[in-house]
Amino acid sequence: MEGVRTRYAKSMATHPNLHYEIPSRIALGAYVIDEERVTGYSPGGPDVVRAVLVYRVAGDLIQEILILS
């Protein structure tokens, strides 16, 4: 979880207008699947970047993250 926080904090520090939105989330067994919409990534870049993140969890810990964009 700390690694995920670090990753997002770095992105937000580099891109101060960055905004993450999770319009949908599915939890099924050991997996959580988030649809992510990102805006404000970079001037001149796309208005919205969409991605799907698949988290594999065990207990309260994230074991693996797969990012599809």
Image (tube, rainbow, N blue to C red):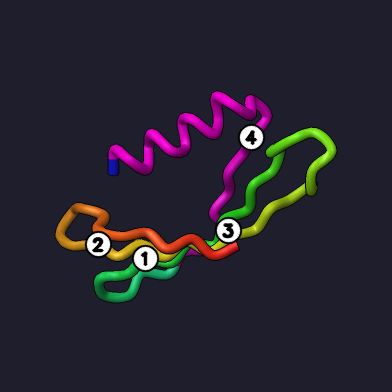
Disc 2 to disc 1, C-alpha distance: 8 Å
Indicate the position of residue 32 as horizontal and vertical percent values. Answer: 37, 65
Indicate the position of residue 56 as horizontal and vertical percent values. Answer: 30, 65
Which residue has dot 4 on it? 18
Q: Which mark is residue 57?
A: 2
Classify residue 58 by image quadrant. Answer: bottom left
| Nearer to me, 15 or 25 | 15
Magenta residues span 2-25
Q: Foreground mark, 3 or 2?
A: 2
Which residue has dot 1 on it? 32
Indicate the position of residue 55 as horizontal and vertical percent values. Answer: 36, 62
SS for dot 2: strand
Disc 4 to disc 2, C-alpha distance: 26 Å
Q: Amino acid at mark 1?
A: Val
Q: Residues at badges 2 and 1 in contact (C-beta under 8 Å)? A: yes
Disc 3 to disc 2, C-alpha distance: 20 Å
Q: Amino acid at mark 3?
A: Pro
Classify residue 54 by image quadrant. Answer: bottom left
Q: Amino acid at mark 2?
A: Val
28 vs 38, left or right, is left
Which residue has dot 3 on it? 23
